[in-house]
Amino acid sequence: MRETAPVEAHYRDEIPVRQGDPFAVRRTEAIREFFRAGGFPTATLEDWRFSDLDGLGRTAYRRYSDVPTLAPAQIDELPGWVGDFGCRVLLSEGHALNADEFQNRNGLEVGSLPAVPAADEPHDWGFVVPGEEPGGTEADLDAPLRHPLEILNAGLFECGFRVRVGRSQDAGPILLYSLRHDVGHPAMLHPRSVIELAAGSRLTVVEAHDGVSETAGWTNPSTLCRVGENAELFYVRVELESGNIAHTGRVTFQLARNARVRSTVLSLTDGKSRTDTAAILTEEGAEVDLEGLFLGVDAAKADQHTLAIHAARHTTSRQLFKNVLSDEATAVFDGKVVVAPGAIGTDASQANRNLLLSQKAAVHTRPRLEINADDVKCAHGAAIGRLDEDALFYLRSRGLGRMDSHEILVRGFAGEVVEKVPVAAVRGLAKDGLTRVRESRSFAA
Amino acid sequence: MTPLLEICGLHVEVEGREILRGLDLEIPLGETHAVMGPNGSGKSTLAHVIAGREGYEITKGIIRYGGEDVSELEPEERARKGVFLAFQYPVEIPGVNNTYFLKAAVNEIRKHRGQPELDAVDFLSLMRDRVKLLDFDEDLIKRPVNEGFSGGEKKRNEILQMTVLEPTLAVLDETDSGLDIDALRIVAEGVNRMRSPERSFLVITHYQRLLNHIVPDRVHVLQEGRIVESGGSGLALRLEAEGYGKAAAVTA
């Protein structure tokens, strides 16, 4: 028998134990699987080459519920933009702040994950059976759910969001907001969320992770979105955590026939983050837009990893990820498109555009295409550059100041992603991020 | 009276290469002057150095505008004092809306002049008025600056900006290049409407045809970085007939 390493023992001790938890057995299996498969990924692995996560494995993070003195935030202490949402789920340190506001009517269910999920819904939380490998030459549709940190989340989650939109309902915008604080010891938070759209429904949802901590912290949320036939999801993710909080998040979209998803990930963190966005186009006519914007200042680092799996005929994916990097900010874009055998008529495009405002800013970009079918259209491109001197002179020759001209060009660059976000409050957050870029040390230096 | 623009013995280097070599030029207020010259004579360098482009190093000489030495001023400072450059190659600026950009520019200039800023309503009515005069497609002003514009639309956009910003000195850098005859006429009419005793134009061109429409008070021939000959508007016709070689021979 294998001896349990101290780090594995630590995480097994962190598994939340509750009476009647239908996931109790799976949790233990998940932790075992995580460590059996190598534990915390290191930079020696191809998928983790540029993701500096070594610190995660070395820090003995503990769950929030281990902090008996913790006082959750009051609703009126939350940032003002949160008030713009009539429908919202607010979590502080994983505890629901506004359970009285949750909706459960007219085919719409909005709430936080119950402390003990109902015994009859274990499959609703998007687990895969650890260790099970796909057979044949078909694309591995569960690959995003086999992500190591996804598996770790499956073992440790004890909070999260749940949204269900009934047939032909039109809902949103809904805010799913998680806030965390410095609790004086290295704390980890593993929210697990499921968003389900029944056939023909529509939803606009914003998932936001906020908080500041000087003590090392770690947030590792998993979100699974199941989008039914002819349903349409606008998903916006905002990463606002700052200080010493490491963020490793995943969102996975499963699209049925003629489903549409438009996803935007805004990384406004000044810490380190990695976000894995995956879209699985399981049936004909499914269509997804994956977009992202990172506004990096100081030593911020944001990794965007994407995966679009075309598993059916005539499916479409478009990816556009942009980075604005000032000071010593670093970005990674690792975008993958997989076209399964037989997925003819696939239309996939991918673009990564980077604006470097400083000599010390850096970006690693890597497109990966795996095409196993004929009659497909796949385009990809990456660009890394500085502000266009001709454009700067053009603006200044019209009377606009040097700083303003720089700012106008940066806003124009970011606008291609920001302006498409269907929620004004979130566009406001992006504008705040652009102001931080303007105020950064290297701006127009 | 002091000329509006006075350039004396100007030497300019670009990337270590001397392009202007002792250029002298005076434009009194209210006059329109043309500078003609062959490719490589320094026409665009002259336009850019008047507007204050970085990287155009004045090694000798002086540029005075309204009696003030502006050689060291930033491009935006010159623009706010009333200098305007219509670009030979207008720049495409993705993601920046034409109207937004022009409103910001107008208000910078108004601020400098001590005038109140225009609000969105006033600005739009000003734009509508100018757009109509230039037969400009109104949809274009809602689009990003110059993005996807045809060559002619870009040049018309330059003139539109000029009519909105109302400069005291407008430098037109080969505004005729790439224009068909109808567009040329519209652009020229836009310029002619703005001619006034309070405004001067410097029209830089390779060809004489633009000067049939914008008839200059004076024509200067630029060759190898210097003005080699000056005369009335008839000089342009002579150059068209005889070519630039003859002008060079006169000075040789």
Image (cartoon, helix red, strand yellow):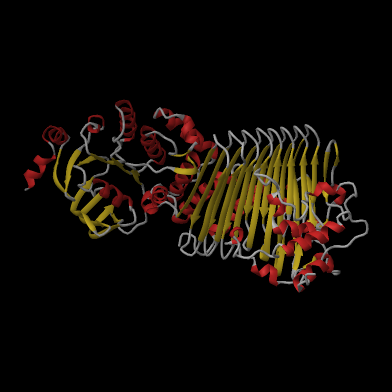
Of all residues shown, which one is farthest toward the top?
B182
Question: Residue drawn 34% across and 44% down?
Answer: B85
Percent position of residue A2, x then y: 78, 70
Q: Is residue A389 left or right of residue B242?
A: right
Q: How many marks?
A: 0
In the foreground, A17 or B49: A17
Residue at the location (64% across, 50% down)? A265
Q: Where is residue B239 drawn, in percent x and y?
A: 14, 36
Left or right: where A324 falls relative to B195: right
Observer able to see residue A92: no
Whole-percent x and y of residue B161? 40, 39
Write down the quadrant of residue B238 in the picture: top left
Is the N terminus of chain A in the top left, top right, bottom left or bottom right quadrant?
bottom right
In the image, taking residue A373 as reference, residue A214 lies left or right, namely right
Taking depth in this image into account, of A194 and B75 the one nearest to the observer is: A194
Q: Is residue B161 visible?
A: yes
Q: Residue furthest right?
A: A19
B152 over A13 or under it: above or below: above
Q: Nearer the viewer, residue A92 or B102?
A: A92
Residue A360 % position (x, y): 48, 65
Q: Quadrant of the C terminus of chain A?
A: bottom left
